[in-house]
Structure formats: C-alpha cells, structure tokens
C-alpha cells in the first residue's frame, strides 16, 4: 500500500502490528485518557491494548457491563475534561445508538470505533463487512449530523484515529471511526509518528471567569463552543432534551429550531475541513474507482496493476464517509467514462455517489457480501462486464 | 450556606404534582449536603429519565440529565475520571431497576463511591401510571388494569446481594431520618444505595385507591418499623427502615489508583 509516514523511519519507530493495536497507539498519541468498553469480536484487541497501556500513561480503562454503559461512561468522563474513546463492533454499535444520540445532542466530544464485521445481527463475527456505513449516519433516532472516518492501511488508521479525536474536540461532537475486521486484524508495517508530527487539537475551554455567567451551549462566531469541566467553578446542566444556552430544557420553537440547525451546520458547513481522501492516478483517469477501508486495498491493487498495462484507471479513496463529500465525488466523476464504487455491502456508498453526480447511470457497483474480502479480480470482472468484454 | 443557596431558584415552583414525595427528598438531600458542608462545585448530580430525574435541574451542582436507566453508567464515567467529585445519582424505581437494573447491580458490584437514591413511588409517574418492577403483586397500573401479576424486587435485598457496601431504606414521612441517611450514604466510602419510599398520589394513589398524599404518608408511618423492631416479628408485612448494610471494601477508584501507582513503580 502507498503510505506517507509523518516521520523518518528508524529501527525504533517501525512496528509490525495489527490494525486494532495501531488504532490504540493512535488514540494514545492523540492523548486518550479514559476508555470504557465491552469485549466484542473483532474489536476486542483495542480494549486489551487500552487496558494494558492506559494505566502506564496515567489514564484509565474500564470494562463495563455492556456497550450501552461503555458509551455512557465515556460521555461522563468527557465532561470532566478528558479525551475519551470506546471501541466495539456491529451488535455493540447497535446498543450504542441511544447514547450516541445523547452525545450528539449534548455536544460531548468522544470517539467511537466500530470495527465492522458481517451483519445484520450477530452475522459474521470473524469476517469482514462494511455494512454499517448507513448505520453510522442514520442509526440514531431523530435528525442529526455526524462525522464518520475510515482507513484502509495501518499508517492511515493511526492518522485517522488522531484525526477522530481532533474533530471530536473541534466540533464538540461524537466521531465514529469505521474500521473493518480485515484491516483490524491484518498485521503490516506502520511507522509511529514522532510526537508533534501530527497536530493535536486540545479541548477548547471557556475563558469566562468565576462568577460571570457562562453559556455552555452558546456557539462563538466560529461555531465552536468552549467547555468547562465538571468540578470547575462553572456549574451548568447537560441534557438530551432540547435546551437553551445554559443547558436547561426548553420547548421554545425558536430555541429548538436554532439547536437542530446548529447541530447540522457545525458539521455540514465544514465539510471541506472534515473531508479526508486519497487520490491515486486521478489526473488522466478515464475509469474511476471509489472505495474505502479494506475494499480500497483491492481497488488500489487493481489500479496499479492495470496502469502497468496502460489502462487509465484511477482511485478515489474516501477516508471521511460522513459528512459525505459529494462535491469532491462529483468533480472526480466528471471526466471519466464510468465509475465503479467498490465496497463490501449492498451499495451504501454507491447510493450516495449516485446522488452526488450529474450522470448516475454511469456509476456501477463492485461489491462482495459473502464475508470474504473483495479481490482485484472481482473488481476487474465487473469492469469488463461494464465494458462489454465479458469475464 | 443556607439551603436555598443550593438550588436554582429560577426554576421554582418545581414541576412535581401537588403532594408528590420527590420534593421532600430534594429538601432532605439539600439539608444533608448542608450538614456535610460540601461545596457546590464538588458535587455532580447525574439523573436518568422520569419524574425523579427532574431533581437534577433544581440543584445548583454540576448536573446531568441523561438517558432512561443509564444514570449510573454516566455517573461511573464522571466518578472514575475525577474521583475527588461527590457523585449523587437519584433514580426512579423503573429507571433504576427495570431499564437500569443491569447498571444498578454492576455499579454495586464494583463498589464505586457514588450514592444511588432510589426514589421509589412504585409506579411510572411521568408516562401516566404504569406498573414498575417495584409495584407490588396485585397492585394496579394503566398497564396492569386487572392487577399486576409480576412480583416486585426488594431493593434492599437486591442491592445487598449485588454487593453494595451501604444499603438503607426510609420514607418521605421520616424526614429527619431521610436527611440523616442521605448524609451517611454520601459520606460512605463505597457504593451506597438508599431506597426512599416516596408517594405518588396522582397515579399510584388514585389507581390503587390508597388515598391522597397524606393517606400514603400515614401508611409509611404505620406500615414501617426500624430494623430489629419486635413489631416485625408480630407482623411480617411491616417494612423495615434503617441502615441494613454498612461495610468496608476496597473502593473501585482507589483500587485503580493503586494499580496505576504499582505500574509506575515497576516501570521505574
């Protein structure tokens, strides 16, 4: 895989490890201080790493009674001023939807890793799948916006984990990191960045002094909301109900409208700041692949293989899935003959891509939904069918 | 500090029905906090959903109004990440022991230093009078129109079995005892559970034909006895009040601090 290490390689910082462990390393780099989780395949190694590493870094790990309480606990810990994370997989992610909505509504920074496996239900615990893309976006009841990131290789898992923490703090929101079983359990090389190589976003705390009225839910002009830690002098209320700028419940239509708009706008209006992607051979491409996560590895393999034979394939690898980077997709699809979305579900990103472009009839799907990793040959076969060449 | 300095006065009068026992619990809680001399910024109140949960909006502490049944889970994260805070978790009976039952027993098992106050009115008040896991067998509710065939939990026995290191019960009739027990529970170095029988004249009282607030308070007076009272021998149906469990066991946050210290020593 193409990698762009942030740091010079030395014998010290080159590691050979599995993706889940890389995610844990990324979280430590980002400054995670509290992790609560519940064992579930294929994400358990993240909790195991946290249990091992956090006490050594002065942080805390808790194994909770379920995934519901895991997310609730990290939300509580975030309010005392700590960077927090939990990790889970499909069934656990379903259980977390209630508290995820709470974190959205109460604007609590936190990172939720979902190492995707085959679903629905208990599905395929030890096999790869990418079926939770829409759940990440729409699993919570009620209108809301969300940030969801993903990565296809270990260098990027590290970086996107750090980015997840940065976005959580910047936008005061839960951020979902959608990894998958294949990259989570794959062992490959990673270069651990030096401290400072990837910028970290610190929590924005209020400068309002003691005795002066503090508004935890009054956005500044730039949309950000400075926080005050529980235990500091500002005492305010946090609720999952619609609330005013002090955090107290309100049913005033103006306040309700203002809050739901704010929850959308702070994310959707910053789509260009949040969009992360990699472009491979796009300049002169006449066939475009769009992919993400484990599927993007096979897509890239095919692109590089075909390039050697003179075929002009290109790959747009998405790392931000939500908010969906529609404009970037539209631009990338504009001058190609056709586009193939490569993913391991029934076409969840495909749907979004078709909504983003002017010519949805030129967008095709190459997928695999049997729990096996989609191969370059699978994608090539679809390409040949589209081209009328036969397999 | 006066009791009124602990409340957010602009939200009064409160939203509880006339005759509701929850205001009495709030009153006793504030007196306990005053007696203990706790600072407002050192207290976090975490509540769930229901009539009981609205208590967190009235107190001038750090307050979290969370999800139905999940208050203890949120509170666990608050306490564990900042153990110097006093964490008080008022819950309703359905809140604590139906949807929140799992969090309840596990918080007790961990022995994390928090105070769980079960404001037990034996009914779901906010949704209009459905039976709860603390509604007695045979009692009436909108979802038990022909009488409740479920059996109820005994909060004291459940909390004790789950490992809570402080377990007490009282009622909104016994206000001095209530304030005293809350103070004891907050001071306890471990997970403390206080069950408070609290009247709901609007739903429980009406549906079960037990009269208004005063009538229910009278039953609290007449149908309860202090632990060890001879009257209980004569009439086993009487409900015991008092501190049932008070024991020392390593507290969760301190245990983790020791673990961190041990790891640091070994690393050096």
Image (cartoon, rainbow, N blue to C red):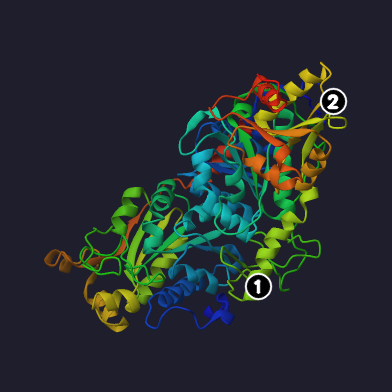
Question: Where residue A171 sits in the image (x, y, percent)?
Answer: 72, 54
Q: Residue placed farthest to the right in the image? A: A283
Q: Nearer the viewer, residue B9 or B206?
A: B206
- Packing grade of label 2 (10 A; few <14, some 14-19, many >=20) is few
**Quarter of the image that includes the N terminus of chain B:** bottom right
**What residue would you read off at disc 1?**
A255
Question: Where residue A115 sits in the image (x, y, percent)?
Answer: 58, 35
**What residue would you read off at disc 2?**
A8
- Packing grade of label 1 (10 A; few <14, some 14-19, many >=20) is some
Residue A279, visible in the rendered structure: yes
Q: Nearer the viewer, residue A40 or B28?
A: A40
Splitting the image into 4 quarters, where does residue B150 fall?
A: bottom left
Left or right of residue A113, residue A331 in this image = right
Splitting the image into 4 quarters, where does residue B98 fall?
A: bottom left
Q: Residue placed farthest to the front in the image? A: A388
Q: Secondary structure at mark 1?
A: helix
Q: Nearer the viewer, residue B144 or B110?
A: B144
Q: Is residue A115 above or below residue A268?
A: above
**Quarter of the image that includes the C terminus of chain B:** top right
Q: Secondary structure at mark 2?
A: loop
Q: Residue at x 52, y 56 (%)?
A: B75
Looking at the image, tell me whether mark 2 or mark 1 is earlier in sequence order.
2
Q: Is residue B42 above or below residue B206?
A: above
Subunit of label 2: A
């Amino acid at each position: 895989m193409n990698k762009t290490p942030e740091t010079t390689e030395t014998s010290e910082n080159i590691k050979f490890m599995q993706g889940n462990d890389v995610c844990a390393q990324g979280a430590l780099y980002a400054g995670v201080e509290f992790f609560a989780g519940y064992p579930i395949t294929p994400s358990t190694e993240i909790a195991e790493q946290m249990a091992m590493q956090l006490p050594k870094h002065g942080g805390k790990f808790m194994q909770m009674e379920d995934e519901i309480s895991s997310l609730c606990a990290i939300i509580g810990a975030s309010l005392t001023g700590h960077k927090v994370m939990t990790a889970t997989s499909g069934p656990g992610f379903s259980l977390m939807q209630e508290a995820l909505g709470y974190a959205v509504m109460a604007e609590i920074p936190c990172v939720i890793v979902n190492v995707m496996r085959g679903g629905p239900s208990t599905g395929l615990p030890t096999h790869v799948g990418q079926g939770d893309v829409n759940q990440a976006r729409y699993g919570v009841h009620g209108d809301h916006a969300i940030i969801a990131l993903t990565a296809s290789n270990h260098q990027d898992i590290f970086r996107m984990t750090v980015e997840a923490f940065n976005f959580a703090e910047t936008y005061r929101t839960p951020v979902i990191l959608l990894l998958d079983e294949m990259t989570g359990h794959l062992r490959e090389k990673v270069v651990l960045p030096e401290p400072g190589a990837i910028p970290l976003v610190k929590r924005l705390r209020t400068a309002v002094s003691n005795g002066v009225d503090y508004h935890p839910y009054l956005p500044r002009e730039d949309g950000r909301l400075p926080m005050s830690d529980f235990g500091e002098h500002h005492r305010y209320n946090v609720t999952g109900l619609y609330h005013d700028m002090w955090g107290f419940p309100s049913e005033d239509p103006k306040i309700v409208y203002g809050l739901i708009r704010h929850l959308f706008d702070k994310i959707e209006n910053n789509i260009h700041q949040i969009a992360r992607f990699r472009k491979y051979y796009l300049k002169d491409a006449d066939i475009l692949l769009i992919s993400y996560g484990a599927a993007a590895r096979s897509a890239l393999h095919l692109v590089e293989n075909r390039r050697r034979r003179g075929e002009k394939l290109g790959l747009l690898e998405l790392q931000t899935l939500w908010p969906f980077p529609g404009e970037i997709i539209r631009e990338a699809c504009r001058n190609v003959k056709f586009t193939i979305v490569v993913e391991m579900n029934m076409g969840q990103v495909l749907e979004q891509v078709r909504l983003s472009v002017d010519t949805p009839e030129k967008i095709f799907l190459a997928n695999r939904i049997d729990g096996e990793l989609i191969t370059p040959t699978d994608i090539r076969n679809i390409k040949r069918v589209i081209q009328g060449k036969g397999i | 500090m006066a009791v009124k300095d602990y409340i957010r006065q602009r939200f009064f009068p409160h939203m509880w029905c006339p005759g509701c026992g929850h205001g009495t619990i709030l009153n006793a809680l504030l007196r306990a906090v005053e007696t203990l001399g706790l600072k407002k910024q050192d207290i976090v109140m975490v509540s769930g959903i229901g009539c009981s949960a609205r208590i967190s909006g009235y107190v001038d502490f750090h307050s979290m109004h969370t999800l139905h049944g999940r208050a203890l889970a949120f509170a666990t994260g608050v306490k564990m990440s900042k153990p110097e805070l006093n964490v008080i978790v008022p819950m309703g009976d359905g809140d604590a022991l139906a949807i929140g039952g799992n969090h309840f027993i596990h918080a007790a098992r961990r022995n994390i230093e928090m105070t769980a106050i079960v404001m037990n009115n034996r009914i779901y008040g906010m949704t209009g009078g459905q039976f709860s896991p603390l509604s007695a067998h045979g009692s009436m509710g909108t979802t038990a129109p022909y009488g409740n065939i479920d059996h109820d939990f005994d909060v004291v026995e459940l909390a004790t079995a789950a490992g809570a290191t402080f377990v007490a019960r009282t009622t909104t009739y016994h206000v001095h005892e209530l304030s005293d027990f809350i103070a004891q529970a907050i001071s306890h170095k471990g997970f403390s559970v206080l069950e408070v029988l609290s009247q709901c004249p609007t739903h429980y009282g009406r549906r079960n034909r037990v009269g208004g607030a005063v009538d229910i308070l009278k039953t609290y007076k007449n149908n309860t006895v202090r632990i060890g009272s001879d009257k209980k021998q004569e009439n086993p149906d009487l409900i015991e009040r008092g501190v049932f469990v008070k024991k020392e066991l390593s507290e969760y946050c301190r245990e983790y601090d020791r673990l961190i210290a041990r790891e640091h020593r070994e690393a050096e």
